[in-house]
Image (cartoon, helix red, strand yellow):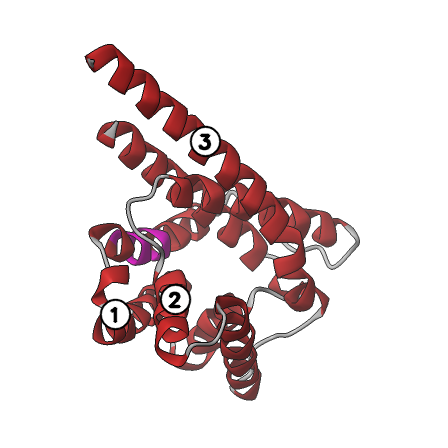
Amino acid sequence: MKMIRWGMFFIGLAVFSLGISTTINVNHLGLHPWDVLSIAFFDNFGLSIGSWNIIIGVCLITVSFILDRSYVRIGTFLNAMIIGSLIDFYLWLDFLPKASYTWTDSVIMMIGIVIMGVGGGVYNAAGVGSGPRDGFMLSISDKTGMSVQKVRIITELIILVFAWLIGGVIFVFTFLFTFIQSPIFQFVYMRMHHKLLDMEMLQERKVS
């Protein structure tokens, strides 16, 4: 089962990264706050979008480790490194649809968000470690006593304002992102999670 879980984890990361890369190509419509920040850093300081994704992830992991190391596992580190690397790889391959500044860009954005929701649900269902952002939110929630949802809203608003101040592009999909992605993520996560549990129960019965 460990092999299946790790296989799901890596497949989920690959799919999730593909979704991010798809949305980046039409980022003038607005992205998730954390991705707005990565692109803003890229525009201002160079390196690559994936590199900034990794740097931000490592910073969040460091804070999480200081506050509550139980949220930091090997999968957390792999999440930060692999997603950032794959974003750069997909963008380097240059095979994804480009912005045309017409209505089709909205379709591309929607497809990218759906892909992210599916990929995020798959790799989280694997249960080998939360992502840097999730671990950060959970550790802050534990220390402050605030709900995870409240911590997420406050954190992402702060990130969004900071990204905007350094030139990040904010538009309509920045505010729609979570409402579109979350239901897809939840559906895929629950389906894959239950399938894994069913497989583990079958395996236990065979062993016994």
Please state which of residues 88 and 118 is positioned toward the viewer in this rendering: 118
Residue at the far right: name it.
103
User: Quick check: marks 1 and 2 in contact, CB under 8 Å?
Assistant: yes
Residue at x 53% of width, y 41% of height: 118
The region drawn magenta spans: 78-84
Residue at x 38% of width, y 29% of height: 197
- Residue at image mark 3: 194
Label for residue 68? Answer: 1
**Which quarter of the figure is the C terminus placed in?**
top left
Q: Amino acid at mark 1?
A: Asp
Neighbour tally class for label 3: few under 14, some 14-19, many 20 plus, Cα within 10 Å: few
Residue at x 51% of width, y 32% of height: 191
Mark closest to the chain's N terminus, 2 or 3: 2
Expressed as whole percent of the image width and height from the top left, the position of residue 5 reads 30, 34
Expressed as whole percent of the image width and height from the top left, the position of residue 114 reads 60, 44
Check if residue 83 falls in the magenta segment: yes
Q: Amino acid at mark 3?
A: His
Expressed as whole percent of the image width and height from the top left, the position of residue 178 reads 61, 59
Expressed as whole percent of the image width and height from the top left, the position of residue 128 reads 28, 45
Residue at x 40% of width, y 64% of height: 133
- Residue at image mark 2: 138
Check if residue 172 falls in the magenta segment: no
Label for residue 111? Answer: none
Mark closest to the chain's N terminus, 1 or 2: 1
Neighbour tally class for label 2: few under 14, some 14-19, many 20 plus, Cα within 10 Å: many
Marks 1 and 2, how far apart at CA? 9 Å
**Which quarter of the figure is the N terminus placed in?**
top left
